[in-house]
Image (cartoon, rainbow, N blue to C red):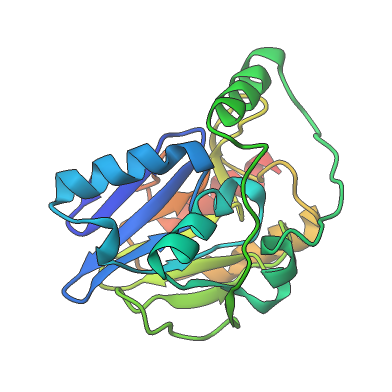
C-alpha cells in the first residue's frame, strides 16, 4: 500500500512493515511474518522494483513478528540486516522474556493469532548474521534514517526517523490498534518487557516534525506527534 511518495506499507493493521525509497534504492523497515513475502513481492512489483533493489533491512526490534522474512533476504539475496546491539541476540533467536498478555478480548486475540499462524508466525527463521547499530546513529542506507532509542518493549527497541520521507517507524514502541483487544488509537503495545520504561521512552519523539508515525501494528498515524503522545498517555 502506498502511503506517500517513496513510502509503502507491507501487510495491514494486524502486522505491518515498511519500504522507504530514494534514488539509491530501498530500505525495508522490519520484515513482518514469513508468509507476508508474497505481499512484499507484489508491492515491489507495483512500485516497478525488485527484491534486488532492497539495500538493507533495518529492524525496530528483534521479535518474531518483525524478523519474518529477514533471514530469507539475507541468505538468498545477500541483503544486510541491521538491529540495535541490545536486540541482536533476540533477532538471532537467543531468547526473550515471557511477558504477560494483559487485557485481551476473544475475537481480536483469535484474529491476531490466526493471522499470524496462517503466515508462518510460529516458524520465523532467526537471523544467522546481523549488523548492529546504536541509538543516535544515522544509518548509511536509503533514506538515511536516524535511530531513536526507545527501550521498553525490548532492550533494543528503536524508532527510525526518515526526515526526507517525513516519517518515523516506531515498531512496537506503541500501537494504534491493540492486537489483543481491538482497541483503536495510540496506546502501549502488548507483550512489552518493561511498560514503565516504554512509556518514558515516548518522550524521545517529542518535537519530531513528521507527517507519518508508522507502527508495527495498527493504522498509519497522521495526527501529529503531540496528539499521538497525548492519546498514548490517556490510554496508559
Q: Residue at x 59, y 31 (%)?
A: 116
Q: Residue furthest left?
A: 48
**In terms of image quadrants, where is residue 191?**
top right
Q: Is residue 75 left or right of residue 39?
A: right
Q: Would you identify the image quadrant in which residue 11 lies?
A: top left
Please determine whether, in this image, residue 24 is positioned above or below residue 107.
Answer: below
> The N terminus is located in which quarter?
top left
Where is residue 176 shown, x and y percent of the image?
A: 52, 40
Q: Residue at 81% across / 34% down in the picture?
A: 102
Above/below status of 111 relative to 176: above
Q: Nearer the viewer, residue 191 or 51?
A: 51
Residue 218 appears in the picture as rendered: no
Tally of numbered discs: 0
Vertical arrangement, residue 124 with respect to residue 153, above or below: above
Which one is nearer the viewer's eye here, 4 or 221? 4
Task: Name the quadrant of the C terminus.
Answer: top right
Tell me, yes or no, if residue 37 can be seen here: yes
- Residue positioned 26% across, 40% down in the render: 42
* Residue 4: image location, x then y, percent: 21, 52
Q: Position of residue 151 (x, y in %)?
A: 70, 67
Q: Horizontal placement of 191 versus 9: left or right?
A: right
Residue ranking furthest to the front: 76
Relative to 87, does residue 221 appear above or below in the rendering?
above
- Residue 167's spot in the image, x, y percent? 35, 62
Amino acid at each position: 500500500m502506498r502511503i506517500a511518495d517513496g513510502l509503502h506499507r507491507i501487510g495491514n493493521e494486524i502486522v505491518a512493515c515498511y519500504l522507504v525509497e530514494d534514488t539509491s534504492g530501498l530500505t525495508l523497515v522490519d520484515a513482518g511474518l514469513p508468509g507476508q513475502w508474497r505481499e512484499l513481492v507484489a508491492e515491489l512489483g507495483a512500485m516497478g522494483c525488485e527484491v534486488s533493489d532492497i539495500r538493507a533491512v533495518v529492524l525496530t526490534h528483534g521479535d518474531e513478528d518483525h524478523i519474518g522474512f529477514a533471514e530469507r533476504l539475507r541468505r538468498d539475496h545477500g541483503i544486510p540486516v541491521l538491529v540495535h546491539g541490545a536486540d541482536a541476540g533476540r533477532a538471532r533467536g537467543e531468547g526473550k522474556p515471557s511477558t504477560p498478555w494483559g487485557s485481551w478480548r476473544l475475537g481480536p486475540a483469535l484474529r491476531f493469532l490466526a493471522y499470524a499462524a496462517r503466515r508462518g508466525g510460529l516458524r520465523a527463521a532467526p537471523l544467522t548474521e546481523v549488523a548492529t547499530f546504536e541509538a543516535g546513529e544515522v544509518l548509511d542506507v536509503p533514506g538515511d534514517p536516524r535511530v531513536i532509542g526507545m527501550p521498553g518493549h525490548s532492550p533494543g527497541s528503536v524508532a527510525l526517523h526518515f526526515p526526507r520521507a517525513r516519517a518515523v517507524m516506531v515498531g512496537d514502541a506503541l500501537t494504534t490498534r491493540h492486537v489483543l483487544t481491538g482497541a483503536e488509537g495510540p496506546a502501549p503495545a502488548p507483550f512489552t518487557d518493561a511498560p514503565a520504561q516504554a512509556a518514558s521512552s515516548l518522550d524521545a519523539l517529542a518535537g519530531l516534525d513528521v507527517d507519518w508515525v508508522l507502527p508495527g501494528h495498527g493504522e498509519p498515524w497522521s495526527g501529529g506527534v503531540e496528539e499521538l503522545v497525548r492519546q498514548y498517555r490517556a490510554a496508559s
